[in-house]
Image: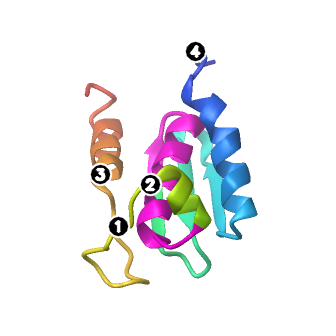
Amino acid sequence: MSTPDHDCLDAETILNDLCASKINASISWIGDGGFHFVLGDPPQAEGWAFSTIGGAAISLRDEACAYYPDSDFARKYGGFVYDHPWPKGSKRLCAKTVFLSICILLGGIC
């Protein structure tokens, strides 16, 4: 079992606000592989290997603000309109996801 995650308190609000903004997203987990999120349908962004659902929700929030900058969700959480440096619909890995994946591969020594 894990210790309480303060980000989980934000996770419920984030997921409810994504739903209210009609932004498609999902969070799942794979055994000991951590939490995984998918933003959009078709997928706009994905993140893997988060150790907590709160961490996955926070990253999902940041990606949603970046991919849907004109949404009410982004206005609430982003506080600014973000101009993506990559075209809409292209898949990418965020730096946090890559770092966490490497950390898991190294046995969690990060």
Specify start and end residues of the magenta stretch as a single range.
48-71
Say which mark, if any, is on residue 98: 3
Q: Pointers 1 and 2 in contact (CB under 8 A)?
A: yes
Residue 75 in percent (x, y) is at 52, 60
Residue 82 marker: 1
SS for tag 2?
Answer: loop
**Which quadrant of the rendered structure holds the C terminus?**
top left
Q: Nearer the viewer, mark 3 or mark 1?
A: 1
Element at label 3: helix
As drawn, the label of residue 78 is 2
2 or 3: tag closer to the N-terminus = 2
**Dot 2 or dot 4, earlier in sequence:** 4
Q: Is 5 one of the magenta-colored residues?
A: no
How packed mark 2 is, by other alpha carbons closer than 10 Å (few <14, some 14-19, many 20 or more), is some
- Residue closest to the eye, 76 or 90: 76
Q: How crowded is mark 3: few (under 14 residues within 10 Å), some or many (20 or more)?
A: few
Q: Is residue 50 above or below residue 70?
A: above
Left/right of residue 48 with respect to residue 85 in the rendered view: right
